[in-house]
Amino acid sequence: MSYQLTAERVFDASAEAVFDAFTSTDAQREWMRDADDPDAVLETECDPRVGGRWVAAWGPSRDELYRETNVFEVVDRPHRLVMATTSSTPDGLTLDTRTEVTFEERDGATRMTVVQSGFPTAELRDYFQSTAWPGALEALHAYLTKEKAP
């Protein structure tokens, strides 16, 4: 048995702006940064094309890095991404999931929906549902809000 999650956020920005902020290496280097720990390690490179990779590593030190590799299976800018995702923790846990992200624009705002499937336990799914994705979407929101400021 595997478990699936859905996370959503509405952004006051066009689908193009949200898609680009989510997939741009330069933008990721800002919105993925841990605001509470400016000395934390963050490395990210993103090549949003079919077969391309988004590789990120982050953590308090080089000895304690969380890693994630996404391989793009579908890239339909600015509407949809599908990725094979492999995540790993410093203690050796590895997790393979499938992540689909859609961007639906209406009246100048964009609903970003993440559906991630393949979690082996409800506890892991719940962590990503309650902590990981909400934190990432909040950071992306802060980045987009900052970008719109005069």
Image (cartoon, grey):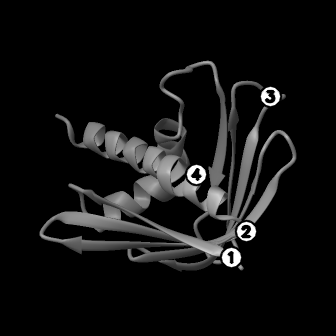
Circles 1 and 2, Cβ within 8 Å, touching? The answer is yes
The residue tagged 1 is: 2
Find residue 62 and report its horizontal and vertical position in percent.
80, 28
Mark 4 residue element: helix
Quadrant, the C terminus = top left
In the rendered structure, which disc, 2 or 3, sits on the residue that comes first in sequence?
Answer: 3
Residue 145, quarter of picture: top left
* Mark closest to the chain's N terminus, 3 or 4: 3
- Badge 3 element: loop
Per the model, the C-alpha gap separating discs 3 and 4 is 23 Å
Q: Nearer the viewer, mark 3 or mark 1?
A: 1
- Along the line of sight, the residue nearer the viewer: 38 or 92: 92
Disc 2 and disc 3: Cα gap in Å?
28 Å
Q: Residues within 10 Å of mark 1 (few under 14, many from 20)?
A: few
From the viewer's perspective, is residue 103 above or below residue 67? below
Dot placed on the residue nearer the N-terminal end, 1 or 2: 1
Q: According to the image, label 4 marks what residue?
A: 127
Residue placed under numbered mark 2 in the picture: 120
- Distance from the alpha carbon under mark 4 to that under mark 1: 15 Å
How many neighbours does mark 2 have within 10 angstroms: few (below 14), some (14-19), or many (20 or more)? Answer: some
**Residue 87 position (above or below residue 112):** above
Q: Residue at x 58, y 51 (%)?
A: 127
Residue under the point 41% across and 63% down: 19
| Gap in angstroms between the C-alphas marked 3 and 1 | 32 Å
Task: Say whether marks 3 and 4 touch (CB < 8 Å).
Answer: no
- Above or below, 112 against 138 in this view is below
Q: CA distance from mark 2 to mark 4?
A: 12 Å
